[in-house]
Image (cartoon, rainbow, N blue to C red):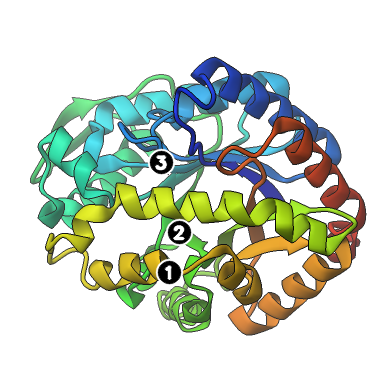
Amino acid sequence: MQFGVQFFPDVRPEEKSGEQYFQEALDLAEEADRLGFSHIRIVEHYFHHYGGYSPNPIVFLAAAAQRTRRARLVTGAVLPAFNHPLKLAGEIAMLDALSRGRLDVGFARAFLPHEFRRFGVSPDESVARFREGIEQVDLLLSRENVSHRGRFHQIENTTSLPRSTQKPRPKFYVAALNTPESFEFAGRMGYAVMAIALVAEKMRPLLAAYREAWKAAGHPGQGEVMVAFHMYCEHDGERARAFATPLIDAYLTSLVEAASDWLDGRVSQDYPGYDKIIAALRASNAAEQIVSGGAWVGSPGEIAATIARLQHEFGGFEHASLQVNFNTMPHREALASMRLFAQEVMPRFTAG
């Protein structure tokens, strides 16, 4: 099993400037690489303090590429709905070159109605834009002289530059949250999958659907799964929970606020049940997330026990992507937590 570090900014300008946030994040990325974490990952979101400091994950990962040597760099994830595939393919290949072939590309549909509204894109086109975007980016990265007439974008006899450093292209991940169809699509297409453990009890059947679709499509192996978690580790588990609980609660509040349109009557054929998902998250809290395993908070021994339990409950997953500086987590505490996790938890699962 491998462990990486994920950045999901959830701060307001009056709490922390963009300059301070990213200098701290890059320091954490450099230390994570030194400690043996396997990847550095960051999101794409806009306009709201929930995620809005990271409108372009490729920019951050290009900076992280210069501060790290071994860790994979993962877009977690880029959003085809808001990006032209010609531009996205060129930026991906450029980052692949800058990182000397350490890039993995995650794609997501986006799920915040306010982003769709501000970009003038209908959420009802989400699935179609997502799948067309991935197909066109794949073609541009892996082939030359590409022509493709899609519903949203047309490409005529185009060779994207630079060419990918990794051949035929970087590994693709697909972000999936709630419906078996999303997990089955990833498995059928032979993509790795990114999942979120905020609704931990749903993970096993969804990951099983992914593995089954992967096998049915004839792909070798059983696929590859990355699951995201909050993480805060201290020697004293009670003190860790007392410290991290208000920060996780604030993060959940920000998420629900950013997605509040789903609670105000917004519906979409491409997002069935999202009103119930956001309502459940509004009713959730840090204590529930810690008990369910969606947040890894406690002593090294307590966190190790949670990891072992989830590996069994989920039916196995290859990568854990850890938010270590969530909400207004002080930099010193995030760094100490990450170091303790690397020293006392990771060796139990990565040895050999």
Nearer to us: label 3 or label 2: 3
Where residue 193 appears, as percent x and y from the top left, is 48, 61
The number of discs equals 3
Q: Residue at x 61, y 69 (%)?
A: 287
SS at mark 2 in the image: loop
Residue situated in front as seen by the camera: 281 or 205: 281
Indicate which disc residue 187 carries. Answer: 1
Q: Residue at x 23, y 25 (%)?
A: 158
Where residue 295 appears, as percent x and y from the top left, is 63, 62
Where residue 313 appears, as percent x and y from the top left, is 63, 83
Residue situated in front as seen by the camera: 63 or 120: 120
Q: Quadrant of the N terminus?
A: bottom right
To which residue does mark 2 refer? Answer: 191
Is disc 2 in contact with disc 1, using a CB cutoff of under 8 Å? yes
CA distance for labels 2 and 1: 6 Å
Quadrant in which residue 320 is drawn: bottom right
Residue 94 visible, this angle: yes
Q: Residues within 10 Å of mark 3 (few under 14, many from 20)?
A: many
Residue situated in front as seen by the camera: 329 or 137: 329
CA distance for labels 3 and 1: 29 Å
CA distance for labels 3 and 2: 27 Å
Residue situated in front as seen by the camera: 186 or 49: 49
Lower position in the chain sequence, tag 3 or tag 1 = 3
Is 22 left, or right, of 118 in this rendering?
right
Where residue 186 appears, as percent x and y from the top left, is 40, 64
To which residue does mark 3 refer? Answer: 50
Q: At label 3, which amino acid type do we have? A: Tyr
Q: Residue at x 81, y 57 (%)?
A: 239
